[in-house]
Image (cartoon, rainbow, N blue to C red):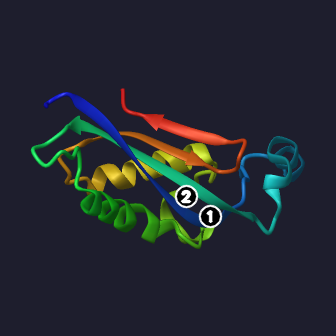
C-alpha cells in the first residue's frame, strides 16, 4: 500500500459554441475556423475524462467514487451541460470558446472546488472522435 495509482472517471455533457476571434475579419475567421465559425454555432457531445492520483487507502481506494462524481458534476457538468459556451458561460466572455480553452476552464473549475485527498492530474476532453484535448499537471 502507499504506492500511487491513477483513477480516471468519464463524464459526458453536451454544449454548443462558435469559434470566432473579434480581432479578425469575417473572412479571416472563416478561413481560420472553417465550419466551426458558423454564425449560428454548432454543438458537441463532449466526453470528459478526469484523472486523479494518490495512494490506495485502507479501503482499497484511491478516491471515494461518489465524492469524486459529486465534485465533477457540481463543478463542471452542472455548469456546462446543454449550454452555449459563448453565451451562457461567463468565463468565455472575450475568450474564444475553443476546446483548448475549455480544457483549461474545466481544470480551473475543478481546482477551485477540489476537496478530495487524491491529486487532480489530468483533464481530457474529446470533442469528436478525431479531436481530443488534454491538460496535465506538471
Task: Please state if 2 lies on the left or on the right of 104 as rendered.
Answer: left
Q: Are marks 1 and 2 in contact (CB under 8 Å)?
A: yes
Q: Nearer the viewer, residue 68 or 58?
A: 58
Quarter of the figure that contains the N terminus:
top left
Crowd around label 1: few <14 · some 14–19 · many ≥20 (10 Å): many
Which residue sits at x=72%, y=47%?
23
**Vertical relation: 52 (above or below) 80:** above
Q: Position of residue 85 (x, y in %)?
A: 59, 64
Task: Please state if 97 lies on the left or on the right of 42 as rendered.
Answer: left
**Vertical relation: 17 (above or below) 101:** below
Kindly state the secondary structure of the residue where label 1 is placed. Answer: helix
Q: Nearer the viewer, residue 133 or 21?
A: 133
Q: Which residue is mark 1?
A: 86
Kindly state the secondary structure of the residue where label 2 is placed. Answer: helix
Which residue sits at x=62%, y=66%?
15
Label annotation for residue 115: none
Which residue sits at x=20%, y=54%?
115
Q: Which residue is mark 2?
A: 92
Residue sitting farthest toward the left: 58
Which residue sits at x=18%, y=39%?
56
Amino acid at each position: 500500500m502507499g504506492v500511487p495509482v491513477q483513477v480516471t472517471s468519464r463524464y459526458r455533457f453536451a454544449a454548443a459554441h462558435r469559434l470566432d476571434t473579434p480581432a479578425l475579419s469575417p473572412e479571416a475567421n472563416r478561413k481560420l475556423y472553417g465550419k466551426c465559425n458558423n454564425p449560428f454555432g454548432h454543438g458537441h457531445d463532449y466526453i470528459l475524462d478526469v484523472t486523479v492520483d494518490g495512494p490506495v487507502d485502507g479501503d482499497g481506494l484511491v478516491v471515494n467514487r461518489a465524492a469524486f462524481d459529486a465534485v465533477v458534476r457540481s463543478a463542471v457538468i452542472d455548469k456546462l451541460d446543454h449550454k452555449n459556451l459563448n453565451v451562457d458561460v461567463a468565463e468565455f466572455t472575450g475568450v474564444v470558446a475553443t476546446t483548448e480553452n475549455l480544457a483549461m476552464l474545466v481544470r480551473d473549475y475543478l481546482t477551485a472546488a477540489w476537496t478530495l485527498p487524491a491529486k487532480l492530474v489530468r483533464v481530457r476532453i474529446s470533442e469528436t472522435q478525431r479531436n481530443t484535448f488534454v491538460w496535465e499537471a506538471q
